[in-house]
Amino acid sequence: MKVFVLNSGSSSIKFQLFLISERTVLASGIVEKIGEEKSQITYEIQAPKSIKNSFEEQIPDHKTGMNRIVELLTDSTLGVLKDKSDVDVVGHRVVHGGEDFKKPALIDDKVLNAIKENSALAPLHNPANIVGIEVAREVFGSAKQVAVFDTAFHHTIPQQAYLYALPYELYSSLKIRRYGFHGTSHQYVAEKAAEMMNRELSSVNLITVHLGNGGSITAIKNGKSVDTSMGMTPLEGLIMGTRSGDIDPAIPFYICNNSDTSIDEVDQILNKKSGLKGICRQNDMREILAACDRDDSQAQLAVDMYCYRIKKYLGSYMAILGRLDAIVFTAGIGEHSAPIRNHICQGLEHLGIAIDKNKNEALKSGCRELQTDNYEVKILLIPTNEELKIALETENLLKS
Ligand code: AMP
């Protein structure tokens, strides 16, 4: 079965084509800057031949972008797809499923309308995902379409953890509550962690730490998400590349009442100008760590704040889990930054957590254990693979 996984943004289409029975990627790529004067198309064909290419071209809209991807993949000299009807199913990443979607869904008009209804909760993401679905339905005609939701894994969070202490009517009328995000990633690494420990997922307690440009941390009890740091939107929780994470909710009012800043500008500040960038002007952790090596005190402050916030969440999630079997690090920073993993784990020996310096700094790829021998809690490094998880979920749904 050939599964085409799509992650559509407001000006981009990211894709991967899987031969899912063999768990192999046939092709992957991204069309960026859709609608701008010059768009960028980058793709890599893995099989049957290995080819990489990147070039500029004007792509005015998503439909042109999708047709261009199909044109590239059906190029007879490459041999990836004979025809677009060769694609059996398209799996879409959909950011917000609200309370409607607790698992992946086969897309029909009713499902598409429900995704549209949830757009108010994710105005930056769902509309772009919807465009991707509409265009793929048109372009791929006969192929089935499946939506896999970032929020779905967190549907097991209990009410005491997902409700905010606001007037209850705000939940009933406006659906204001914690939903959580990065669910596909948290679920994927949790399953891998259970596999690495030779245990059933339903028997393990984990804290999964997804540290990319966005970041979130999830408490998993007996294989199920019971709390997570992102909230109604992906703004809450950890300090991120450009997002503040947790702040006193009175701060936006204080800014508006005491400066010439509008509420929309505060939104921009919290989402785009805060986090690591707000503290030290940079949001790429590689550059921030290089600045720390040059004794840049502002970069060091950003790193200290970043790790402190994660440590605070680790402590609170350990308290609610009772027993902790493993901490899992994943995503760009979690997978690649030994100094950040080390900083977060320092001083936690009294909680049964200690990281081994050599294991942490070893230049190896793939899943591995990082804890000091004889310490109770495992520290696992597990590369996430959201696209593969979407492809597997898509395959599962069709089989069932
Ligand atoms: P992601 O959103 O998962 O792609 O992660 C992106 C982030 O990972 C970037 O902002 C980088 O700061 C970070 N990153 C990637 N490689 C490294 C590395 N070797 N060391 C530190 N941070 C890294």
Image (tube, grey):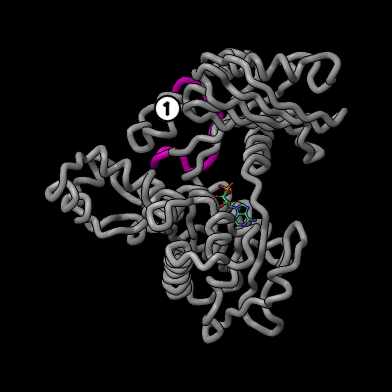
Asked whether 68 or 163 is in front, the reply is 68
* Disc 1 element: helix
Mark 1 CB near ligand 1 (8 Å cut): no
| Magenta highlight: main SS | loop
Identify the residue at horizontal 47%, vertical 38% (top origin). Answer: 95
315 or 162, which lies in front?
315
The image quadrant that residue 391 belongs to is top right
- Quadrant in which the N terminus is drawn: top right
Query: Residue flagged by tag 1: what amino acid is it?
Result: Pro
Q: Which residue is mark 1?
A: 127
Residue 272, image x, y percentages: 38, 44
In percent of width and height, residue 225 lies at: 49, 58
Name the residue: 63% across, 29% down. 30
Which quadrant is home to the C terminus?
top right
Dot 1, crowdedness within 10 Å: few (<14), some or many (≥20)?
many
User: Which of 171/60 is in front?
Assistant: 60
Q: Residue furthest front?
A: 294
Q: Is residue 67 above or below residue 246?
A: above
Q: Is 104 within the magenta?
A: yes
Question: Which quarter of the picture shows residue 268?
Answer: top left
Stretch in magenta? 97-111
Q: Position of residue 381 (x, y in %)?
A: 66, 63
Identify the residue at horizontal 71%, vertical 32% (top origin).
28
Of 381 and 363, the residue lying toward us = 363
Q: Is residue 75 magenta?
A: no
Residue 291 at least partly seen: yes
Is 51 on the left or on the right of 109, as rendered? right
